[in-house]
Image (cartoon, helix red, strand yellow):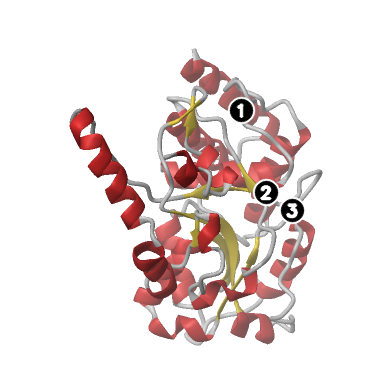
Amino acid sequence: PQSFLADFHSTALNSFEYKGKIVGVPCYYSPTVLFYNKNLFKKAGLDPNKPPKTYDEILRYAEKLSKLTTDKGEKVYAFGLPYASGVAAGNSINTVIMSFGGTLLDEKGKLSIDNQGFKDAITFYKTLDDNKYNPQNCLPKNLRQMFATESLAMYYDQAGGYAPISNINPAAKDFTAIAAAASGGTGDGSTLIQSHCLLLANNGKKSAGGTAALVQFIMSKEVMGDYLVNLFPAFPALKSMDTIPLFPILDPLKGSNLKLAKQTNIGTTNKLHLELAKLIQAITISKTEVNTAIKDFEKQATIILR
């Protein structure tokens, strides 16, 4: 019913728009956030209560954090961004582009990379790699493992990434903190959201009413509210649940105005995200010049979008 749909936060719901129609509803939303290790901040002489808010600050923090070693004498990486081949890594790269004020696609789903924010974001990956701040060619799961074992000081992940971190190392609750994503260039730190959703198959009109009732039951405070409070670190998609307690790790962001961005959905988004990962691999692993790598990406993206 429209009253149910009206209760959703607009950015969360509109992220499920395709060709002008809402084709799904989010169970919750999990924005990209900055995870950082409070213990490593202290060792590096940084205030754990003052996480970096801009990419320039991230680089200044990273310079100090990169000089640390683990208790086993191994290198501590300062700041992790995933870019190994995978859709999730490409989604993360797209988020960084947005946080720099750049774009990948315009509102009509056409390629839109001729902007300073796009180039600034790609150059940022090169800067991280040149200074050996970012572990090369990792997926989100690799960065979670490194963060859980305290060999990574800061990294980007969706808020729900804390669940596997705590599974790897239950003591992570003592050193983990999160903050809003940083901003750079003309950007304001806006990031894409990720969400679990229910996949529904049409089994005829007679089933529609029961299906609608089931979805609303799952999204109720008694069910989804309990899940978010006790089991999974994410934010409620329904405005009526904004007053429920959050998973403890999210307390620093409670009541904050997280800047969420919507990406125009097209059928080939995943393929574009895979090409974004290849773009970052080109400038880091293959040492391709940034402008050349961007032109190569543009050629492949144009073919995908035909």
**At x 66% / y 62%, what residue is drawn?**
180
The residue sitting at the top extreme is 306
Identified by mark 2, the residue type is Ser
Identified by mark 3, the residue type is Ser
Q: Position of residue 296 (x, y in %)?
A: 58, 24
Give the answer, above or below, for where 191 lies relative to 60: above
**Spatial CA span between label 1 and label 2:** 15 Å
Q: Nearer the viewer, residue 288 or 4?
A: 4
Mark before the other along the chain sequence, 1 or 3: 1
Quarter of image, res 100: top right
Mark before the other along the chain sequence, 1 or 2: 1
Give the answer, above or below, for where 257 lies relative to 185: below
- Tag 2's secondary structure? loop
The residue sitting at the right extreme is 186
Q: Which residue is mark 2?
A: 190
| Residue 284, visible in the rendered structure | no
Q: Nearer the viewer, residue 41 or 91?
A: 91
- Tag 1's secondary structure? loop
Mark before the other along the chain sequence, 3 or 2: 3
**At x 43% / y 25%, what residue is drawn?**
267
Q: Nearer the viewer, residue 86 or 191?
A: 191
Q: Position of residue 293 (x, y in %)?
A: 61, 31
**At x 77% / y 34%, what residue is drawn?**
116
In the picture, the disc for residue 105 is: 1
Identified by mark 1, the residue type is Leu
Q: Which residue is mark 3?
A: 183
Mark nearest the camera among 3 and 2 is 2
